[in-house]
Amino acid sequence: MDQRTDQPSLTVIDNRTGKKYEIPIEDGTVRALDFRRIKVREDEFGMMLYDPAFTNTASCRSRITYIDGDKGILEYRGYPIEELAENSTYLETAYLLLNGELPHQGEFQDWVYQVTHHTFIHENVKNMIDSFRYDAHPMGILASTVAALSTFYPEAKNVMDPENRQRQAFRLIAKMPTLAAFSYRHSVGMPCVYPDNDLSYIGNFLNMMFRTTELKYTPDPVLEKALDVLFILHADHEQNCSTSAMRGVGSSHPDPYVSIAAATAALYGPLHGGANEAVLRMLRQIGNRQRVPEFVKNVKAGEGRLMGFGHRVYKSYDPRAKIIKRMADAVFEATGSNPLLEIALELERIALEEEYFVTRQLYPNVDFYSGLIYQAMGFPVDMFPVLFAIARTVGWLAQWEEMLRDPEQKIARPRQIYLGESKRAWVPRDKRVRA
Ligand code: ACO
């Protein structure tokens, strides 16, 4: 405690100079900028904090998503994920994330109307999709075309106008499924299916993905509900890699389309949005239930990882994985079981009993079962990160909105510790020698 101000503080003694500094503590955190006062000489830059990958650095104050990784708690705006998955819908959860409150009946109707009536994309965007190679990855198409929307809505650049931001949010939430489905249809050489405004958000997405010759597509209610829940589970996860990209790019105030494209690109990486695909590959490689003990033995010996297990934040069962596992039965009843499921169940059973996994607090994460469900629903593996991107769009937008309203936020600009050469004399090319 700082005796003079009664504020909790940290006392830092610089052993280089013997000087003592009182650093205020607020919300269990110290401000990095307070360390700048710590110097040996007056003309020095001052002390910085080094934190590659931001493993222990808070970049914002947020009121959107709360995670307690030790207890396995995930809440959106204070509502437990389990309750939202049980009682809410994806669009209602999207409203909650963006606006901070669950909508009243009238607010909800208006919200659904707005999202439903912004689903079409300009024909030129469709032509752009058609111009990609036949085997283009749908995630690459999605990132490119969402960036291209920037050129169709030039007014979106007025990012400090709240009404304008809301209009772009409607468009993005509404158009991401259309871009995603058109990208998929292109990759399988099928004609695009235009949005059907009579269907729910999820029902329409399934329609655009899978409709073939039916005059009117009717989604299977079990699959519609399951995908809705999966979208709720993926809607936000505080300051992860893609959200940090959204905030970082958005901090220089471009329109949200290019910022969402950057977030989509971050999600494309196998360390972020691609893990459920890796789970499927692993299960196929194991091949059958009998080979599970041998596979676990190899993992324990350091030969590869058990994909879909472990998490940087969750040190207990990922609450999203629990919900997905419960839902899997209903989905497999509608689709027929995924033969890889019994390998997954056996893998989980054995791993949870093994000391190696218990002592390292490795539990199934959201990706352990989601890929199995997506595959059973008929989504090809390439579409898994695309599904993630559609669901996460509202989380990115909510975080972007919060950043723009936060008076403390500025253009993101980390510091570095420079370790390179200094002040070298320029030498003409014919005189250069390499040691
Ligand atoms: N299988 C086997 N061992 C593991 C696993 C795993 N899946 N995950 C961690 N470990 C071990 C590590 O080898 C390490 O052991 P050691 O202490 O003997 O060296 C220890 O557990 C700690 O692991 P770290 O890599 O330090 O943990 P970190 O928090 O950096 O990694 C991560 C988290 C990347 C998720 C990791 O658990 C992993 O690679 N999991 C598999 C991939 C995966 O499922 N990713 C999806 C995450 S969810 C999402 O992004 C939506």
Image (cartoon, rainbow, N blue to C red):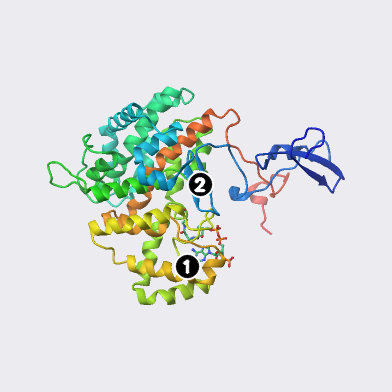
Observer-side mark, 1 or 2, equals 1
**Quarter of the rendering containing residue 103:** top left
Assess disc 1: are there few (<14), some (14-19) or many (≥20) residues with their C-alpha within 10 Å of its C-alpha: some
Amino acid, disc 2 = Asn
> Which SS class for mark 2?
loop
In front: 168, or 142?
A: 168
Mark on residue 55?
none
In the image: residue 405, left or right of residue 261: right
Q: Is mark 2 within 8 Å of ligand 1?
A: yes
Q: Position of residue 343 (x, y in %)?
A: 36, 69
Q: Residue at x 41, y 45 (%)?
A: 83
Q: Can residue 24 be seen in this view?
A: yes
Residue at the extreme right: 18
In the image: residue 192, left or right of residue 419: left
Placement of 226 over or under 246, stated as above or below: below
> Which SS class for mark 1?
helix
Q: Name the image quarter holding the C terminus.
A: bottom right
Amino acid, disc 1 = Leu
Q: Which residue is drawn at 45% across and 24% down?
A: 162
User: Which label's residue is closer to the chain start, 1 or 2?
Assistant: 2
Q: Position of residue 293 (x, y in %)?
A: 43, 76
Mark on residue 352?
1
Residue to which mark 2 is pinned: 240
In front: 344, or 6?
A: 6
Q: Where is residue 402 in the image (x, y as percent from the top left)?
A: 51, 32
Q: Are marks 1 and 2 in contact (CB under 8 Å)?
A: no
In the image: residue 215, left or right of residue 383: left
